[in-house]
Image (cartoon, helix red, strand yellow):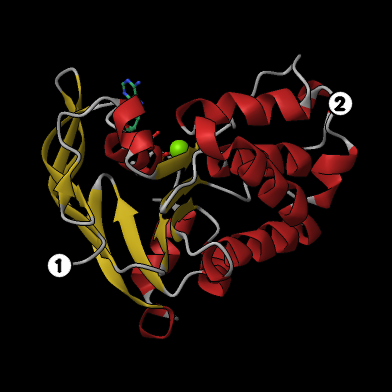
Amino acid sequence: MAFLEIDSLNAFYGKAQALHDVSVQVEAGEIIAIVGANGAGKSTLLDSIMGLTTVTGDVRLDNESLAGKRSAEIVASGVGYAPERFNLFPYMSVEDNLLVGAYTARDDIDKNLATVNKLFPRLKERRKQETSTQSGGERQMVSLGRALMTSPRLLLVDEPTIGLAPKVCVEISEALQKMRDELGATIVITEQNANFAMTLAERLYVLESGVIKAQGTVDELRGDSRLTEAYFGH
Ligand SMILES: Nc1ncnc2c1ncn2[C@@H]1O[C@H](COP(=O)(O)OP(=O)(O)O)[C@@H](O)[C@H]1O
Ligand SMILES: [Mg+2]
């Protein structure tokens, strides 16, 4: 039994089906990537793990079913989420945005804030700055930091590199590796950028039109046409 087990997940927006029989297994301590073009269903998959969509099928974390749980309960059971477009409060400071993330983990606030500040020294320097005035890379750091404030065992990150310069992508990649290596988080990212996904993740799933078209290790999928097709869309 893997740490995260997604079994035959179907997700619906009204009558439209956005995920079809999606199954994903993630071992504890792995970094995996869900790669797919715009509209493939990447955000829907992460939203579905968080209990934010209408689904059939099951999601189990450490052998405990998340099906039917409310999002706050899913966060409390150890899932941190850094969603697409961050959902930060633009007119609040960096530090207040981080503290909003801590609402389910009252006991660990100081420890988690110290962890985030160590991981992202730039956020500590700029803790009083409104996030609306920050660069995309800094806001991505606040978003990752906010997810860490919930003491996650599983971290879900939606398109961590979208709109970021290559140099900033490297910083984000290093931070995610530290979250796994030093904090012990298991990590699932989504990406349109297959090259970035292959440098960070150990295994990939290729998602196309809500269907898993291929899966394997980075070496197994290198040069696979299904990966290139997912990247460029169709
Ligand atoms: N709130 C929504 N209501 C209706 N359809 C949606 C909604 N969100 C996403 N979709 C549809 O679900 C499919 C997958 O979208 P999404 O998960 O956002 O893809 P991705 O994140 O890979 O770009 C698309 O066809 C999209 O139009
Ligand atoms: Mg998306």
Residue 7 sits above or below residue 228 on the image: above
Quadrant of the image where one finds ligand 2: top left
For this view, does 89 lie left or right of residue 193?
A: right
- Precedes in sequence: disc 1 or disc 2: 1
Tell me the quarter of the picture where residue 113 sits.
top right
Location of residue 175 in the rendering, given as x and y in whole percent from the top left corner: 66, 60
Q: Is residue 189 above or below residue 55?
A: below
Q: Which mark is residue 1?
A: 1
Residue at point 59%, 60% (across, down): 176
| Residue 31, image quadrant | bottom left
Residue 126: give x, y in percent of width and height. 88, 35
Residue lying at the far front in this picture: please name it.
107
Label 1 residue near ligand 1, CB within 8 Å: no
For image coordinates 48% across by 34% down, the residue present is 105
Which mark, by number, is residue 129?
A: 2
Q: What's under tag 2, amino acid-wise?
A: Gln
- Say which residue appears at 20% left-offset and 39% top-offset: 66
